[in-house]
Image (cartoon, helix red, strand yellow):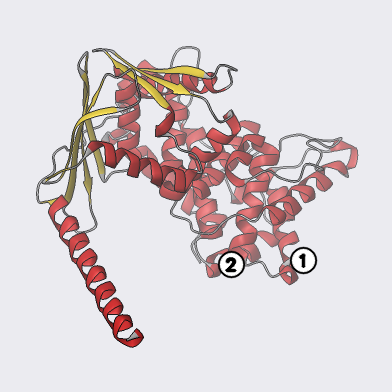
Amino acid sequence: MIIYWAKRLIIAATVIVMILIIASSLFVVVIHQSHPLQLSSTQVDSNTARFAKSAIARNVRLLGQQHQNVDFKVSAAELMSMVEILERTNPDISIHFNMTNNGLYIESTFKSRWQRYINLSLLILPSSSGISIAHLRMGNISLPADYSLKFVDYLLKHFTGIELLSYVNSVATTNHLLTIGYTMVNNKAQLIGSLTNLAKRFGSQHNVDNDLKLTALYYRQLQKIQHHSSRCKSRPLSFFIQSLAQSSAQMSHLGYSAVEQNRAAIFALAVYFGSYRFEYFIGKLATDIPRKPRCYAIPPLAKRVDLTQHFIYSAAIELLSSKQTSEFVGELKELLDSNLNGSGFSFVDLMADRAGVRFAQLATDSEDSAFYHQQLLQRTFSDSDMFPSNITLPEHLTQQAFEHAYQHIDAPAYEAIIQQIDTQLTSLTVYRIP
């Protein structure tokens, strides 16, 4: 009798699994369509960067307040700018929205790996009690809004550790402004940490996690080098990179791969010479590590400290995201600088950004590539092997001068000078593919 019921149970379970597989397959087929609902036509310029920065900076400041309930506000122009940036860094995504007093209507298209399209449309209504959706459609299927929201919130909690949507307490829209009321149940560090975990999971092409213990070893090595510097002598960036590469040879017995070593070394450079805020992304280094030694100074690259920061920031961002994102972050920074009171758009800074991206790629692309570049860096080399010593690229361009000469970052004139930069970098020793 027990065997009989066991067989029946196995058969029933098999049937249920088969039904779920068939239903899932049909769902995937039905939501794919042959034509996109929206097509991306973004042209990112200085105003795009300015509006996006304004919205992000203003709302991030709210996270530091002690109030439990906050109102995040984004204008239509700011929201459009952030959509353009999202589309620019994710070419397979297209988004269009229409904001009125009656709600926020969104249409989006995602290009799938089968060269077909997943189209999504939804209408978010003004509400004084959480998120209210009147219309939600994916492909040819209308989805139940309440269950879909709960499912999305469940996924967000799984990936970030907190329920982000559950604490939205109101939504208000006009033709020009979106206001989201939010209950702050988590502190700023928790919220930023959760969001960055989400960004890393879906935004990065790298699947090697950073080892905090190894990063701390490299960090201490940087401190040791500067602390014992003879008469606090200033050293170029290449000196520190070479020292870390030589340290890697001594750490080989610890069992770390070359990719893990190079990745940790880049993050140590980013935290030590860049910003402790990178710890939001990689985790907190040991609390017993002092921040700055007696001879602390940011080393120059091509005799410029600002180029060092461009280089190491871009290298670290590359490891946290993707080539397209890390290069675009550099472009956004220069577009912001071209605005009023900025230092102006600099193609030299942009070259340092792209150099950092390429450095990180070659140092972590594969075990063979990582080991090759470790060996290369352990030998004698100078800053001129990492960055051209004599550069004649345009700098200090105002917004008007940049747009007059290059229009925007997708225009042919701009792409021509980017090609020139990449050609110069590939000719340097450090960036040659083995």
Residue named by callout 1? 250
Q: Of all residues shown, which one is farthest toward the front?
A: 1
> What's the amino acid at mark 1?
Gln
Q: Name the foreground residue: 13 vs 305.
A: 13
Q: Secondary structure at mark 2?
A: helix
Residue at x 53% of width, y 66% of height? 369
Q: Quadrant of residue 308?
A: top right
Identify the mark at residue 372; answer none if there is no mark.
2
Q: What residue sits 30% from the left and 19% below the top?
A: 127
How busy is the neighbourhood of tag 1: few (under 14 within 10 Å), some, or many (20 plus)? Answer: few
How many angstroms separate mark 2 from mark 1 (CA)?
16 Å
Residue 224, x across and y down, in percent: 83, 47
| Image position of 167 (left or right of 9) | right
Identify the residue at image location x=55%, y=68%.
367
Relative image position of residue 236 (x, y in whole percent):
71, 42
> Where's residue 44, x and y in %?
32, 29
